[in-house]
Image (cartoon, rainbow, N blue to C red):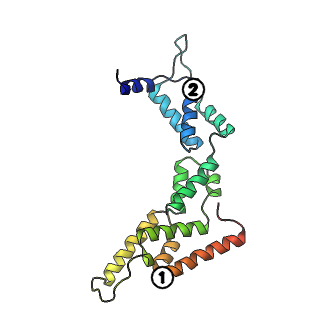
C-alpha cells in the first residue's frame, strides 16, 4: 500500500473525544482561527469521518461546542486577537473597513469584537492610498498629456469610473475614493493622510 492510500485510511478513522481534541489542538496551532471557524471545521470532520463506537458498539455525540469553549478559556483560540491580526493584514494589503468587516463576519467574529477592531480613520485613509498607489490610480497614475487626443473627456470619465469601482470593491468609503481620485497631486493626498494621523494623535488612539 502506498503512502497516499495510508494517509487516506488514517483520515477516515472515526473520531472519539481524544481524536477530536487532537484535531482541534492541531488546527489551532497551525492556523489563526476563531471559535466559530474551529467549530465549523470540527463539525465537518465529524461528518466526514463519523463517530467511533465504544466496546458495546454504541456511539455518542461528541461535544464540539464544549471542546471549543474550553480551548477559548485556555487561550488557544482568541477571537479578539484574530480580529486584530486580520484587520492589520487586510488594511496593510490595501483593503478598506467594509472588507475588514465582511471578513470578520465570515469568520464568525461577534459584532462587538468587530466594532472594537475596526480600523480608524487614519488606517482607512492609509489603506485607500496604498491601493491607489499600487494600482496607479488618480494622482499616482500617468499624467494626462494635453497634446494626446486619445485623452478625451469620455476616456477620462471611463477610467475614473473603473478606478472608483475597483476601490469600492476593495471596501473603501466613497468619500475617501473621491478625494484621492480628485486630488491634484500625491502631496495633497499625503497631507490628507497626515491630518488624520494628527487627529488620532490628539485623541490618543490609532483606531485599534
Give the side of residue 170 with respect to residue 81, left or right.
Answer: left
Furthest residue to the top?
A: 56
For residue 62, what is the image quadrant?
top right
Q: Mark 2 highlights which residue? A: 62
Q: Quadrant of the C terminus?
A: bottom right
Q: Can you say whether 62 is above or below 149 in the image?
A: above
Give the side of residue 3 with respect to residue 90, left or right.
Answer: left
Q: Position of residue 130 (x, y in %)?
A: 49, 68
Of badges 1 and 2, the one in the foreground is: 1
Residue 188 visible to an observer of this rendering: yes
Q: Residue at x 53, y 61 (%)?
A: 92
Residues under numbered marks 1 and 2 in contact, where contact means CB atoms less than 8 Å apart:
no
Chain-order first, disc 1 or disc 2: 2
Q: Position of residue 45 (x, y in %)?
A: 48, 31
Q: Mark 1 highlights which residue? A: 185
Q: Secondary structure at mark 1?
A: loop
Give the side of residue 20 with respect to residue 150, left or right.
Answer: right
Furthest residue to the left?
A: 149
Q: Secondary structure at mark 2?
A: loop
Q: Position of residue 186 (x, y in %)?
A: 49, 79
Q: Quadrant of the N terminus?
A: top left
> How dense is the environment of label 1, judged by Cα within 10 Å: few (below 14), some, or many (20 and up)?
some
Structural distance between the alpha carbons of marks 1 and 2: 61 Å
Q: Residue at x 64, y 52 (%)?
A: 113
Q: Residue at x 65, y 39 (%)?
A: 72
Amino acid at each position: 500500500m502506498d503512502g497516499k492510500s495510508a494517509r487516506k485510511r488514517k483520515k477516515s478513522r472515526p473520531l472519539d473525544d481524544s481524536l477530536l481534541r487532537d484535531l482541534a489542538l492541531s488546527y489551532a496551532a497551525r492556523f489563526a482561527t476563531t471559535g466559530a471557524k474551529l467549530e465549523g471545521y470540527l463539525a465537518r470532520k465529524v461528518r466526514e469521518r463519523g463517530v467511533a463506537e465504544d466496546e458495546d458498539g454504541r456511539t455518542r455525540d461528541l461535544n464540539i461546542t464544549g471542546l471549543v469553549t474550553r480551548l477559548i478559556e485556555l487561550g488557544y483560540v482568541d477571537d479578539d486577537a484574530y480580529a486584530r491580526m486580520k484587520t492589520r493584514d487586510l488594511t496593510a494589503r490595501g483593503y478598506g473597513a467594509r472588507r475588514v468587516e465582511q471578513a470578520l463576519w465570515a469568520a464568525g467574529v461577534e459584532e462587538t469584537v468587530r466594532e472594537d477592531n475596526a480600523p480608524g480613520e487614519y488606517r482607512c485613509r492609509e489603506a485607500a492610498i496604498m491601493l491607489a498607489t499600487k494600482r496607479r490610480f488618480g494622482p499616482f497614475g500617468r499624467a494626462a498629456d494635453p497634446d494626446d487626443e486619445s485623452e478625451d473627456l469620455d476616456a477620462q470619465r471611463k477610467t475614473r469610473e473603473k478606478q472608483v469601482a475597483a476601490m469600492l470593491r476593495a471596501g473603501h468609503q466613497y468619500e475617501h475614493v473621491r478625494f484621492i481620485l480628485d486630488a491634484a497631486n500625491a502631496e495633497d493626498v499625503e497631507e490628507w493622510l497626515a491630518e488624520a494621523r494628527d487627529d488620532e494623535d490628539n485623541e490618543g488612539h490609532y483606531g485599534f
